[in-house]
Amino acid sequence: MKGRAEARIGAEKFKLHMIKIHVLGTGTSQGIPVVACDCHVCQSDDARDKRLRASVLVQTPHNVIAIDAGPDFRQQMLREKVRRLDAILITHNHKDHIGGIDDVRAFNWIQKRPMDIYGNESSLEVIQKDFSYAFGEDKYPGVPQINLHTISSEPFSIRQDKIIPIAAYHGKMPVLGFRIGNFSYLTDASFIEPEEFDKLRGSKVVIINALRKEKHHSHFNLQQATELLQELAPEKGYITHISHQMGLHREVNDLLPENIRLGYDGLQIEIKD
């Protein structure tokens, strides 16, 4: 784990056999602070308690890939000084995971090509509906240019990177996590079949969702996520998609095993294969 790099993402030289993870956001659909909330978490002065909507950026020797593009996508790209983006992987179609897709326009302009977006059939249907102006025959000049790619739980490749989708459920809603090399990411899940859970095994770093300490109908809680991470036994496990009901970052971290931490916005992780 290191502090924020000075080099712009997409412009820096990159070591072979290394993956860098930039945690763009770790908050739930409302983020933290929640609008008009006076709770002690929303009013905290600790920067780690300020959470944008959940997303990560994965940088390999071959690609720069975002997982999800929620309403804070523009702010996250600016904060991390992202100059290149090759693709976006979509976990599911809720607005806090797709609401910022319009802002791929900047990358269209810089990279002179459409943005490749990968998701399951239901996610891509919602994207086409919500951003219909980007898919019409008579497009307004400057609308986002997007190539949609339908995926299932079967592996696929983006350039030389093998992407392994991980099927799970967000309540009754099918969602996808993703494994890239020795990094695995699963958010907005409350149930996962054993054969899909096995895809996570052997990962050096796993990020998984936990909304709060109490049980929830469509998200893992802190105990469930911790137990899953303990079974996987990665070198490092991190919690994401955190609500203000979880509590203060520093206090919750004190309750967790040494190799499991709450994630926070701006966290950077390097994984060497």
Image: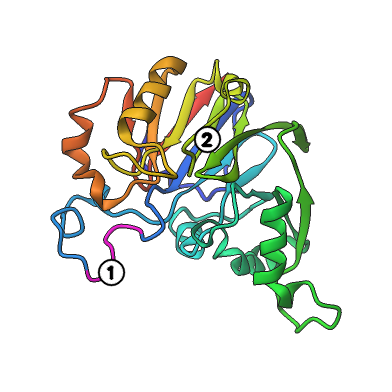
Instruction: Name the residue furthest right.
Output: 137
Tell me residue 141's x, y (percent): 75, 82
Q: Which residue is mark 2?
A: 185
Badge 2 vs badge 1, beta-carbon distance below 8 Å: no
Residue occupying image coordinates x 49% and y 39%: 189
Q: Main secondary structure of the magenta part?
A: loop
Q: Based on the displayed image, in which of its 4 quarters is residue 209 positioned? A: top left
Nearer-the-camera pick, 272 or 26: 26
Residue occupying image coordinates x 31% and y 29%: 223
Q: Is residue 186 above or below residue 90?
A: above
> Helix or strand or loop: what does disc 2 sit on?
strand
Q: Is residue 32 shown in magenta? A: yes
Nearer-the-camera pick, 59 or 236: 236
Q: Which residue is mark 1?
A: 35
Q: Which residues are magenta?
A: 31-36
Q: Earlier in the sequence, mark 2 or mark 1?
A: 1
Tell me residue 25's x, y (percent): 42, 50
Mark 2: few, some, or many residues within 10 Å (few <14, many ≥20)? many
Q: Given the image, on which type of amino acid does mark 2 rest?
A: Tyr
Left or right: 228 as drawn, with respect to 165: left
Residue occupying image coordinates x 55% and y 65%: 100
